[in-house]
Image (cartoon, rainbow, N blue to C red):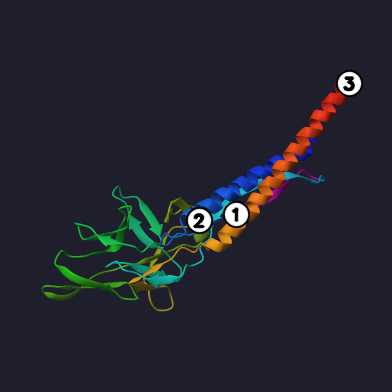
Amino acid sequence: MDRALYAAATGMAAQQLNLDVLANDLANADVAGFKGSAASFTELAAPGEVGLGTVALGEHVVLAQGRLSKATGSFDMAIDGPGFFAVTGDRGERAYTRDGEFSRGADGKLRNALGYALDGVRIPNDAISATVAQDGTVSVTTTHGNAVVGRIPVAEFAAPEHLRSLGGTLFEATRASGAPRLVAAGGRGPHLRFGMLEESNVSIIEAMMSMLAAQRAYEADAKGVQAADEMLRIANNLQRG
Protein backbone atom coordinates (compact mmCIF):
# COMPACT_ATOMS: atom_id res chain seq x y z
CA MET A 1 0.00 0.00 0.00
CA ASP A 2 2.95 2.32 0.69
CA ARG A 3 4.16 1.50 -2.81
CA ALA A 4 0.75 2.31 -4.29
CA LEU A 5 0.65 5.59 -2.39
CA TYR A 6 4.12 6.53 -3.59
CA ALA A 7 3.35 5.60 -7.20
CA ALA A 8 0.20 7.72 -7.24
CA ALA A 9 1.90 10.65 -5.48
CA THR A 10 4.82 10.72 -7.91
CA GLY A 11 2.33 10.54 -10.75
CA MET A 12 0.60 13.63 -9.37
CA ALA A 13 3.93 15.48 -9.15
CA ALA A 14 4.76 14.52 -12.74
CA GLN A 15 1.43 15.73 -14.07
CA GLN A 16 1.74 18.97 -12.11
CA LEU A 17 5.04 19.68 -13.88
CA ASN A 18 3.40 18.79 -17.19
CA LEU A 19 0.55 21.21 -16.47
CA ASP A 20 2.98 23.99 -15.52
CA VAL A 21 4.88 23.57 -18.80
CA LEU A 22 1.68 23.55 -20.86
CA ALA A 23 0.32 26.59 -19.03
CA ASN A 24 3.51 28.53 -19.78
CA ASP A 25 3.28 27.54 -23.45
CA LEU A 26 -0.32 28.74 -23.67
CA ALA A 27 0.52 32.01 -21.91
CA ASN A 28 3.15 32.74 -24.58
CA ALA A 29 1.31 31.36 -27.61
CA ASP A 30 0.96 34.86 -29.10
CA VAL A 31 4.57 35.95 -28.48
CA ALA A 32 6.66 36.26 -31.63
CA GLY A 33 9.57 33.82 -31.75
CA PHE A 34 8.48 31.92 -28.63
CA LYS A 35 9.41 28.24 -28.50
CA GLY A 36 7.25 25.79 -26.59
CA SER A 37 8.63 23.20 -24.19
CA ALA A 38 7.88 19.57 -23.39
CA ALA A 39 8.30 17.75 -20.09
CA SER A 40 9.97 14.33 -20.02
CA PHE A 41 9.38 11.51 -17.51
CA THR A 42 10.53 7.96 -16.91
CA GLU A 43 9.53 5.02 -14.77
CA LEU A 44 11.14 4.76 -11.35
CA ALA A 45 11.98 1.14 -10.58
CA ALA A 46 14.46 -0.87 -8.55
CA PRO A 47 16.43 -3.68 -10.25
CA GLY A 48 14.17 -6.70 -10.68
CA GLU A 49 11.16 -4.80 -9.31
CA VAL A 50 8.00 -3.56 -10.94
CA GLY A 51 7.58 0.18 -11.37
CA LEU A 52 7.68 2.17 -8.16
CA GLY A 53 6.46 5.45 -9.61
CA THR A 54 7.35 8.27 -11.99
CA VAL A 55 10.33 10.59 -11.98
CA ALA A 56 10.67 13.83 -13.97
CA LEU A 57 13.66 14.17 -16.28
CA GLY A 58 13.01 17.88 -16.74
CA GLU A 59 11.81 19.87 -19.70
CA HIS A 60 13.33 20.66 -23.06
CA VAL A 61 12.65 23.34 -25.64
CA VAL A 62 10.95 22.38 -28.91
CA LEU A 63 12.80 24.32 -31.61
CA ALA A 64 10.48 23.64 -34.54
CA GLN A 65 10.05 26.78 -36.62
CA GLY A 66 6.84 28.76 -36.28
CA ARG A 67 4.84 30.17 -39.18
CA LEU A 68 6.09 33.40 -40.74
CA SER A 69 3.57 36.21 -40.99
CA LYS A 70 3.51 39.80 -42.20
CA ALA A 71 4.72 42.34 -39.64
CA THR A 72 3.91 46.00 -39.17
CA GLY A 73 7.05 47.25 -37.42
CA SER A 74 9.64 49.23 -39.36
CA PHE A 75 12.48 46.89 -38.33
CA ASP A 76 10.71 43.56 -37.87
CA MET A 77 12.38 40.51 -39.38
CA ALA A 78 12.40 36.73 -39.10
CA ILE A 79 14.89 33.93 -39.60
CA ASP A 80 13.72 31.41 -42.17
CA GLY A 81 15.67 28.31 -41.22
CA PRO A 82 17.85 27.34 -38.24
CA GLY A 83 19.72 29.79 -36.07
CA PHE A 84 19.16 32.73 -33.75
CA PHE A 85 19.56 36.49 -33.62
CA ALA A 86 22.56 37.37 -31.44
CA VAL A 87 21.69 40.17 -28.99
CA THR A 88 23.56 41.95 -26.21
CA GLY A 89 22.21 43.46 -22.99
CA ASP A 90 23.24 46.77 -21.44
CA ARG A 91 25.72 44.96 -19.16
CA GLY A 92 27.31 43.08 -22.03
CA GLU A 93 25.44 39.84 -21.41
CA ARG A 94 25.00 37.73 -24.53
CA ALA A 95 21.73 36.10 -25.45
CA TYR A 96 20.06 34.51 -28.46
CA THR A 97 16.50 34.75 -29.70
CA ARG A 98 14.16 33.95 -32.56
CA ASP A 99 12.07 37.04 -31.82
CA GLY A 100 12.78 39.55 -34.60
CA GLU A 101 10.54 42.33 -33.32
CA PHE A 102 13.04 45.20 -33.13
CA SER A 103 12.79 48.97 -32.89
CA ARG A 104 15.42 51.68 -33.30
CA GLY A 105 16.76 53.24 -30.12
CA ALA A 106 18.13 56.74 -29.65
CA ASP A 107 21.65 55.36 -30.18
CA GLY A 108 20.70 53.84 -33.53
CA LYS A 109 20.85 50.27 -32.28
CA LEU A 110 17.99 47.89 -32.99
CA ARG A 111 16.60 46.66 -29.69
CA ASN A 112 13.94 44.18 -28.66
CA ALA A 113 11.26 44.77 -26.03
CA LEU A 114 13.71 43.80 -23.25
CA GLY A 115 16.32 46.32 -24.39
CA TYR A 116 18.76 43.79 -25.88
CA ALA A 117 20.60 45.21 -28.91
CA LEU A 118 20.90 43.29 -32.17
CA ASP A 119 24.48 42.54 -33.19
CA GLY A 120 25.87 43.71 -36.49
CA VAL A 121 23.98 46.91 -37.25
CA ARG A 122 23.44 50.52 -36.22
CA ILE A 123 20.93 52.74 -38.03
CA PRO A 124 22.11 56.36 -38.55
CA ASN A 125 19.92 59.14 -37.17
CA ASP A 126 19.29 60.64 -40.60
CA ALA A 127 17.98 57.36 -42.06
CA ILE A 128 14.63 57.78 -43.77
CA SER A 129 14.06 54.09 -44.40
CA ALA A 130 15.86 50.78 -44.03
CA THR A 131 15.74 47.36 -45.63
CA VAL A 132 17.35 44.03 -44.79
CA ALA A 133 18.28 41.64 -47.58
CA GLN A 134 17.94 37.88 -47.25
CA ASP A 135 21.68 37.62 -46.61
CA GLY A 136 21.40 40.05 -43.67
CA THR A 137 22.81 43.10 -45.46
CA VAL A 138 21.25 46.25 -44.00
CA SER A 139 20.76 49.18 -46.39
CA VAL A 140 19.40 52.59 -45.51
CA THR A 141 18.22 55.62 -47.40
CA THR A 142 19.37 58.90 -45.88
CA THR A 143 19.19 62.52 -46.87
CA HIS A 144 22.57 61.99 -48.55
CA GLY A 145 21.64 58.88 -50.52
CA ASN A 146 21.79 55.11 -50.06
CA ALA A 147 24.31 53.26 -47.89
CA VAL A 148 25.04 49.83 -46.44
CA VAL A 149 25.35 50.12 -42.65
CA GLY A 150 25.95 46.55 -41.55
CA ARG A 151 25.22 42.87 -41.93
CA ILE A 152 23.20 40.90 -39.42
CA PRO A 153 24.77 37.51 -38.59
CA VAL A 154 22.89 34.37 -37.62
CA ALA A 155 24.10 32.40 -34.59
CA GLU A 156 24.09 28.62 -34.95
CA PHE A 157 24.86 25.95 -32.35
CA ALA A 158 26.03 22.36 -32.59
CA ALA A 159 23.32 21.28 -30.11
CA PRO A 160 20.73 24.09 -29.86
CA GLU A 161 18.39 21.86 -27.86
CA HIS A 162 20.76 22.33 -24.91
CA LEU A 163 20.48 26.13 -24.83
CA ARG A 164 19.35 27.44 -21.46
CA SER A 165 16.13 29.43 -21.43
CA LEU A 166 16.34 32.85 -19.79
CA GLY A 167 12.58 33.23 -19.88
CA GLY A 168 10.37 34.44 -22.69
CA THR A 169 12.20 34.20 -26.01
CA LEU A 170 15.79 34.57 -24.78
CA PHE A 171 18.36 31.79 -24.50
CA GLU A 172 22.00 31.58 -23.45
CA ALA A 173 24.73 29.23 -24.56
CA THR A 174 25.80 26.31 -22.37
CA ARG A 175 28.68 23.87 -22.47
CA ALA A 176 26.28 21.25 -23.83
CA SER A 177 24.96 23.50 -26.60
CA GLY A 178 28.44 24.45 -27.73
CA ALA A 179 29.75 27.93 -28.49
CA PRO A 180 27.80 30.04 -30.99
CA ARG A 181 29.01 30.12 -34.55
CA LEU A 182 28.13 33.35 -36.34
CA VAL A 183 27.35 32.67 -39.98
CA ALA A 184 26.21 34.82 -42.88
CA ALA A 185 22.63 34.33 -43.94
CA GLY A 186 21.68 33.50 -47.51
CA GLY A 187 22.89 30.82 -49.87
CA ARG A 188 21.96 27.35 -48.67
CA GLY A 189 21.73 28.45 -45.06
CA PRO A 190 19.06 30.42 -43.21
CA HIS A 191 17.57 33.54 -44.80
CA LEU A 192 16.36 36.74 -43.18
CA ARG A 193 12.83 37.81 -44.07
CA PHE A 194 12.45 41.54 -43.61
CA GLY A 195 8.93 42.73 -42.79
CA MET A 196 8.00 39.30 -41.40
CA LEU A 197 7.82 37.82 -37.91
CA GLU A 198 8.03 34.21 -36.78
CA GLU A 199 4.98 33.24 -34.78
CA SER A 200 5.16 31.03 -31.71
CA ASN A 201 5.42 27.33 -32.55
CA VAL A 202 2.84 26.52 -29.85
CA SER A 203 -0.41 25.07 -31.20
CA ILE A 204 -3.15 26.32 -28.89
CA ILE A 205 -5.47 23.43 -29.77
CA GLU A 206 -2.83 20.76 -29.20
CA ALA A 207 -1.67 22.39 -25.95
CA MET A 208 -5.24 22.56 -24.61
CA MET A 209 -5.86 18.91 -25.51
CA SER A 210 -2.62 17.93 -23.77
CA MET A 211 -3.62 19.98 -20.74
CA LEU A 212 -6.99 18.23 -20.57
CA ALA A 213 -5.27 14.83 -20.70
CA ALA A 214 -2.81 15.90 -17.99
CA GLN A 215 -5.64 17.13 -15.76
CA ARG A 216 -7.45 13.80 -16.10
CA ALA A 217 -4.25 11.90 -15.31
CA TYR A 218 -3.70 14.12 -12.26
CA GLU A 219 -7.23 13.45 -11.04
CA ALA A 220 -6.76 9.70 -11.52
CA ASP A 221 -3.51 9.80 -9.51
CA ALA A 222 -5.24 11.85 -6.80
CA LYS A 223 -7.90 9.16 -6.50
CA GLY A 224 -5.11 6.60 -6.24
CA VAL A 225 -3.60 8.54 -3.33
CA GLN A 226 -6.99 8.67 -1.61
CA ALA A 227 -7.57 4.93 -2.14
CA ALA A 228 -4.11 4.00 -0.82
CA ASP A 229 -4.57 6.30 2.17
CA GLU A 230 -7.94 4.70 2.95
CA MET A 231 -6.44 1.20 2.77
CA LEU A 232 -3.66 2.24 5.14
CA ARG A 233 -6.25 3.63 7.56
CA ILE A 234 -8.26 0.38 7.45
CA ALA A 235 -5.10 -1.72 7.96
CA ASN A 236 -4.11 0.41 10.99
CA ASN A 237 -7.59 0.01 12.51
CA LEU A 238 -7.43 -3.78 12.04
CA GLN A 239 -4.08 -3.94 13.79
CA ARG A 240 -5.42 -1.95 16.71
CA GLY A 241 -8.51 -4.16 16.95
> Which stretch appears magenta?
39-47
Number of marks in picture: 3
Q: Is residue 176 visible?
A: no
> How far apart, in angstroms, are the residues tagged by discs 3 and 2?
53 Å
Residue identified by numbered label 3:
241
Residue 124 in view (yes/no): yes
- Reading the image, the residue beneath label 1 is 211
The residue tagged 2 is 26
For badge 3, the amino acid type reads: Gly
As drawn, which residue projects farthest toward the bottom?
187
Q: Which mark is residue 169?
A: none
Q: Position of residue 145 (x, y in %)?
A: 13, 76
Tell me the CA gap for discs 3 and 1: 45 Å
Position of 124 with respect to 75 (left or right) is left
Callout 2: SS: helix
Find numbered disc 1 in the image and state the secondary structure of the residue it sits on.
helix
Q: Does the stretch in magenta take in 2?
A: no
**Mark toward the start of the polypeptide (3 vs 1):** 1
Q: Are marks 3 and 1 in contact (CB under 8 Å)?
A: no
Q: Amino acid at mark 2?
A: Leu
- Say whether residue 44 is magenta: yes
Would you say 231 lies left or right of 23 here?
right
Say which label, 3 or 2, has the lower sequence index. Answer: 2
Residue type indicated by callout 1: Met
Residue 49 located left or right of residue 222: right
CB of mark 2 within 8 Å of CB of mark 1?
A: yes
